Image: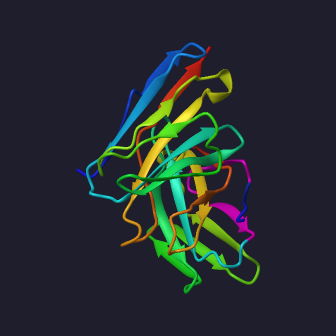
Amino acid sequence: GENVEQHPSTLSVQEGDSAVIKCTYSDSASNYFPWYKQELGKGPQLIIDIRSNVGEKKDQRIAVTLNKTAKHFSLHITETQPEDSAVYFCAASLYNTDKLIFGTGTRLQVFP
Amino acid sequence: EAQVTQNPRYLITVTGKKLTVTCSQNMNHEYMSWYRQDPGLGLRQIYYSMNVEVTDKGDVPEGYKVSRKEKRNFPLILESPSPNQTSLYFCASSSYPTGAPEAFFGQGTRLTVV
């Protein structure tokens, strides 16, 4: 079955710097890759997703890239702000199922 | 407002005392699921339901039961809780199979079993 590895487990950056979180997946059939942001005391919230027919997707300061050959995808946050501080989870699945396999999470801290 | 509502948010109980965590969604989603979140392990699926009266095991179903008598509700039942079920629990729903599989999560229930 699918296995998703996520790195790093913690990441500290200065406000205004960029942050990059990387995930690798094992099942080459996976074709849907969402990213979730979990703030303290809240449930995970979808922030961006990408499907395997594109290599990159951008939404304001957030972008996700996908390398199908290497089976890895990354979340890029530019111009980080303190409110970006949260735990971020990647996940992988087949688009025609709802079996999401999650990474173990990255705690991002943005220092003012 | 589209939302998934879990109750209670916090629960402390004793070993062996049956409990139920409720979950309700207002998006008319057919697909609902339960996850537990533990440090270093991420989110792991406990049970899922494709529709009313259709439920199936996820990755870590031992010690849990679910029911889906109505489309909007998907309660999680612990018949005889044990300390290893101390965890943070999330209910989720999605528009699968008609839409993208991204999940909408509830606020979470922090369960402590002593």
Residue B66 image position (x, y, % from top left): 47, 41
Residue drawn at x 32%, y 58% as measured from the top left? B29
Dominant SS of magenta comes to strand
A35 w.r.t. B58: above or below:
below
Residue B41 image position (x, y, % from top left): 70, 44
Residue A94 image position (x, y, % from top left): 57, 73
Position of the C terminus of chain B, as image quadrant, is top right
Q: Identify the image's colour scheme: rainbow, by chain, secondary structure or one colour.
A: rainbow
Q: Is residue B19 visible?
A: yes
Q: Is residue A25 magenta?
A: yes
Q: Camera-side residue: B43 or A1?
A: A1
Residue drawn at x 53%, y 26% as measured from the top left? B79
Q: Is residue A94 left or right of residue B69?
A: right
B51 w.r.t. A87: above or below:
below
Residue drawn at x 60%, y 47% as measured from the top left? B43
Q: Is residue A107 visible?
A: no
Residue B9 image position (x, y, % from top left): 42, 28
**Res. B8 image quadrant:** top left
Q: Which residues are magenta?
A: A8-26
Q: Is residue A74 left or right of residue B71?
A: right
**Res. A72 image quadrant:** bottom right
Residue drawn at x 59%, y 68% as measured from the top left? A93
